[in-house]
Amino acid sequence: MQKTNVFPKDFLWGGAIAACQTEGAYLEDNSGLAVSDVSFFDPKLDRQDLAKHRRITSEIIETAMADTGTARYPKRHGVDFYHRYKEDIALCAEMGFKVFRFSIKWSRVFPTGEELTPNQAALDFYDRVLTEIEKHHMIPLVTISHFEMPLALVNRYNGWADRRVVDMFYRYADSLFARFGQRVPYWISFNEINAGRFSTFKSTGVVEDKSANYLQDCYQAVHHQFVAAAKITKRLREINPNAKMGCMIARFTTYAATSKPDDVLQMMLDEQHDNFFYTDVMVRGAYPHYMKRFFAENNVKIAWAAEDEALLKNYTADYLAFSYYVSNVTSAAPEASATTEGNLRSSLKNPYLESSAWGWQIDPKGLRYTLNTFYDRYQVPLFIVENGLGAEDVPDEKGQVVDTYRIDYLQKHLEQVREALIDGVDLLGYTAWSSIDLVSSGTSEMSKRYGFVYVDQDDEGHGSLMRTRKASFYWYQQVIASNGEDLSYSKQTHVALTEL
Ligand code: BG6
């Protein structure tokens, strides 16, 4: 069948980054320590066993606080976006980005989270970043919290488990709206809010050994984030009624291991508990029925304040954003244990899919399935705010990175986006992860690269930090220029690279 172009004229093409994986300058201009500054790099890391990186203990935090270096803590140096943002944003503009997604580092603006006024130097920095984005005629999509909460709030309150953090977050978000509220059309409250259950420390700052009832604290923390998201949505609407506040989850598209009814039921439960719980609350505005049973059976009792129910109901998300990297497989069999890694969590292996070097199962069709599933359920605009391939790029003898595997990954996913648009899904845009190489969130490695732009830096932080356009850079430029019509990878794309 001949396909006509189906990407809307105003489709928001772009790319995404997060402050804690790019900025570096972790103490500059009075910035405070963030949870991300505790994430360590382990050279002996087993790429297929990342649970260790998710389990941050009080002891790991103490060791990190005593070490002021960056070698073991790569997110502290990032890729120096703090000083090179002009060059990095110009490269995004060169690819033709319509939108640039970045996050603001909470601990830069409120170093301990408890200050009553924001750190002006930090706001000035983000002001300059926004000016640069505007200069290149892109629009900003700002994530308010992307795994960067002040570490002081972890030490003092056990993170979001404590209700008082809601007010501190509100103060932080309010300071952003006061300064940038008229300049940012799209916001996301929390990056991958369901990470609170899977990568709890970096998402909510809850430390297992500080919790008397860890599961209870995990869900209480998430509840506080729901309330905080509703409160800041209310505030944003007062300040700029035209701005949009999105919710976001890491989409764990989940298949049953077999057609056995037990496995299919397990799939339903995983979908409900791991995905829809978060979007049901944030898009529909109330806790879904199925969580009552789950909480009762797991001895979780969420403390609600008087205002919560009305806040959740009245200040739902304007659009649903999600990251999509992989799909998962689940089974009811007690002996079935996860056999491969994925975004934030592990999964059973899917025999029909290939995996990345990190074991993440590549499933483009799962993206069409996901887009349809979400749109069927909610009928609100969707936004794919992360999708990409983590791979070990090796520059050739000319210093060029011909990342055809990344082009192949993105191309196949965009083909499925196109199918979903034909299906009738309302999709605002697509921001690939990531516009430029950055430090891995899960493993703090540099060698797990996602960018269209190569950054000369290794896992230990050595390198010139020089930026080089990869083959995928030219490919994506062509995709955007054709508004998604031309997804092909041609010789021409390649020639542009080799003729440099
Ligand atoms: C998402 C995060 O979970 O996945 C990003 O929002 C992250 O911050 C991305 O970088 C890829 O994960 P990783 O662990 O490969 O960096």
Image (cartoon, rainbow, N blue to C red):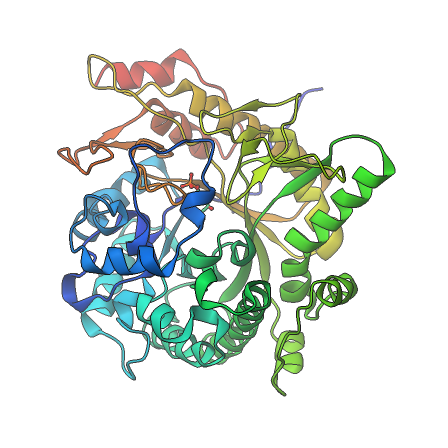
Tell whether 396 sits left or right of 225. left
In this view of the protein, which residue sits in the foreground, 322 or 267? Answer: 267
Residue at the image position 25 percent from the left and 43 percent from the top: 88
Where is residue 437? Give x, y as percent.
Answer: 31, 37
What is the residue that sits farthest to the left in this orientation?
464
In this view of the protein, which residue sits in the foreground, 248 or 334? Answer: 334
Residue at the image position 20 percent from the left and 31 percent from the top: 456
Residue 188 visible to the viewer:
no
What is the residue that sits farthest to the bottom in this orientation?
306
Where is residue 416? Give x, y as percent.
Answer: 62, 31
Where is residue 160? Give x, y as percent.
Answer: 47, 70
Q: Is residue 438 above or below residue 286?
A: above
Q: Is residue 26 above or below residue 387?
A: below
Tell me which corner region of the image, top left, top right, bottom left or bottom right, holds residue 177.
bottom left
Residue at the image position 23 percent from the left and 48 percent from the top: 81
> If the image is split into quadrants, where does the N terminus sit?
top right
> If the image is split into quadrants, where does the C terminus sit?
top left
- Split into quadrants, the picture shows ligand 1 in the one at top left
